[in-house]
Every structure is written in structure tokens, then in C-alpha cells.
Amino acid sequence: MFQVRIHGRGGQGVVTTAELLSVAAFAEGRHAQAFPTFGSERTGAPVVGFCRIDDQPIRTHEPVDRPDAVIIQDATLVHQVDLFEGLATDGYLLVNTSYGLAELGLDAFVRRFDPDRVMTIPATELALMHLGRPLPGAVLLAAFAALTGQVHLSSVLEAIKERFAEPVATNNVAAAEDAYDRVRAQIKETARAQAD
């Protein structure tokens, strides 16, 4: 079973992001579940979404306390909440930011991880560029697909098209494709740097 925890703030679409990931997994014939947990019910409060993906039926419905991947939709949460609790060093970390990990104060923490499993992407900026709105969910899902290989880009795009009406669907698809290409390019660059 592959377990994902998504951290963001109210109004960022954390719930939608988790649901779209589960729909993408369903599109591939896998079992999946997605659900949120909310802190205080106020605008901007931290929200956590969970998604499980497996080839077998999923019987547990508990929050994900040992994630295989953590997606951070709002980097301002990095030093306010323990976002990395339970994440093993062979897990994946994806952060929505235009800053580097050192600028976020995470460089010492992420040194324990395989560099191919830790990625930053300016998801909000890409969403603004393609959608005109700061909705990073589709961008992060495509980046997640490129980083982990847990779902295919085509399944993410199918989930986006199923969820959104036009022209929002087309714009989200463009943002997702852009993100996927950027992450694949970053992975290749990291591999080249390690080979040198």
C-alpha cells in the first residue's frame, strides 16, 4: 500500500487534490481512498488530506501516520506543524515553493533523503500562469506522478478532465503537463550531477 499525506491550508483544495489522486489510481484499476482531517474550522487553518493506493482492497480508514509521500501545498506550514512525522528516509517529499530547500530551512533535514525523492516545484506560480488562479492541486498531482511513478500522467489528466468543466479543465491539464515535464527534467539533472 502506498500512503500519501497532503498538507495545506483551508481553501487550497487539499481535499480535491487527495480526491483527484484517488480517481487517477482508480483509472488505472487500482484501489484507492481519499479523506481529509480538519483542524479549527476557520479560513486559512491547516488542513490535511490523505490518500491510499493499493492493488488490493483497502480496509483501514485511519489517518496516515506513516506516509510514503508527503505533499506540502503551503510551504509556510513547514516550521509551524510537524509535516514530516512518520516519513521514512526512503519516502518522497514534494514542496510547493519557488524557493530552494535551504531557503526553507530544510536542507539539513532532507540530506537524509535520496535526492531523487525530494523535489520543490513552484506549483502556485504555474497555476497562476496557466489558470490565472492560485490553485496548485493539479500541478502538484502531476509533479507527484513524475516524482513517484505511483500513477501515470495520463490518469492524472483524465481525473482533471472528469472533475472540471471547460476551460478550467484544459488550463489545469496545461499546468499539469508543464509540472510533469519540469519534474522529469529536474530528476534527469540530478542524475547527471550524481554521475559526474
Image (cartoon, rainbow, N blue to C red):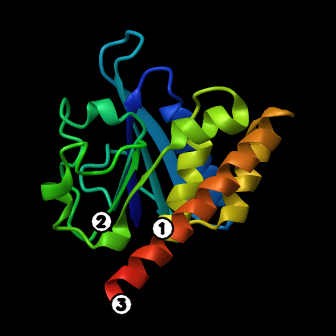
Can residue 27 be seen from the camera position used here?
no
* Residue at horizontal 12 percent and vertical 57 percent from the top: 108
> Hey, which quadrant is residue 182 in on the image?
bottom right
Where residue 148 appears, as percent x and y from the top left, is 47, 68
Q: Which mark is residue 195?
A: 3
Farthest right residue?
166
Where residue 91 appears, as percent x and y from the top left, is 30, 65
Q: Are marks 2 and 3 in contact (CB under 8 Å)?
A: no
Q: Relative to residue 189, is residue 129 drawn left or right? A: right
| Label 2 element class | loop
The alpha-carbon separation of the residues under discs 3 and 1 comes to 14 Å
Q: Which mark is residue 19?
A: none
Can residue 113 be seen from the camera position used here?
yes
Q: Residues within 10 Å of mark 3 (few under 14, many from 20)?
A: few
Q: Residues within 10 Å of mark 1 (few under 14, many from 20)?
A: some
Kind of residue at badge 1: Gln
Kind of residue at badge 2: Gly
Where residue 186 appears, as percent x and y from the top left, is 48, 67
